[in-house]
Image (cartoon, rainbow, N blue to C red):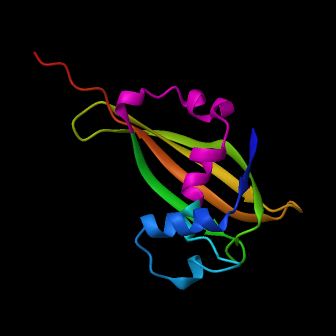
Amino acid sequence: MSFEVPIERGKIREFAKAAKSEQSAYDRPGAVIEPTFLTVARNFWAPRESGVFSELNFDLARMLHGEEEFEFYGPLPTAGQVLHGQTRLGEQWEKEGRRGGIMKFARIVTEFRNDDGTLVAEQRSTIIETARPSKES
């Protein structure tokens, strides 16, 4: 399921302030996004019913955020642009936990395209479901 991400100058400024950035590039006309700004895009603009997390079938009580990676394919987006996001489930794998049990991993990929369909950025998030606690004897 796709969603729109309006890049607004005020939101860029709020995000930069929350990240304690003092770069003037985030607080002027034509402001560029801070590279990690797209983290909030999926949280705020993606529809809840997108289904990616439900496809995982992870136990929310044991779910952790493992890693976040961004790749930009040109200049950073600027205030006034609208990006179109599309999220999909990427690779999934398992490994033995240090304390026993199986840990599950999944990569969630969100592509951000501009109005003409050009890929602007890709966000890759690694989500982890920790192993079930061992039973005490």
Name the residue at 68% across, 45% down: 87
Is 42 displayed left or right of 102 in the figure?
A: right
Extreme residue in the top direction: 137
Q: Position of residue 48 (x, y in %)?
A: 63, 33
The one nearer the camera, 60 or 136, is: 60
The answer to whether residue 55 is magenta is yes
Within the magenta stretch, is there residue 100? no
* Quarter location, residue 92: top right
- The residue located at (57%, 76%) in the rendering is 26
Q: Residue at x 67, y 42 (%)?
A: 88
- Residue 31 coordinates in the image, percent (x, y): 65, 76
Name of the residue lying farthest toward the right: 116
Furthest toward the left, the residue is 137
Q: Which corner quadrant of the image does residue 98 belong to?
A: top left
Residue 9 at x, y percent in the picture = 65, 68
Residue at image coords 56%, 71%:
34
Q: Quadrant of the C terminus?
A: top left
Q: Is residue 56 above or below residue 43?
A: above
Q: Is residue 54 above or below residue 81?
A: above
**Front-most of 115 and 126?**
115
Direction bottom: furthest residue: 24
Boundaries of the magenta span? 38-63
Relative horizontal placement of residue 89, taking residue 112 as reference (left or right) = left
Placement of the N terminus among the 4 image quadrants? top right
* Pick the front one: 87 or 79: 79
Is residue 73 depicted above or below 42 in this figure? below
Q: Position of residue 3 (x, y in %)?
A: 74, 45
Tag count: 0
Q: Please name the predominant secondary structure of the magenta segment in the image.
A: helix
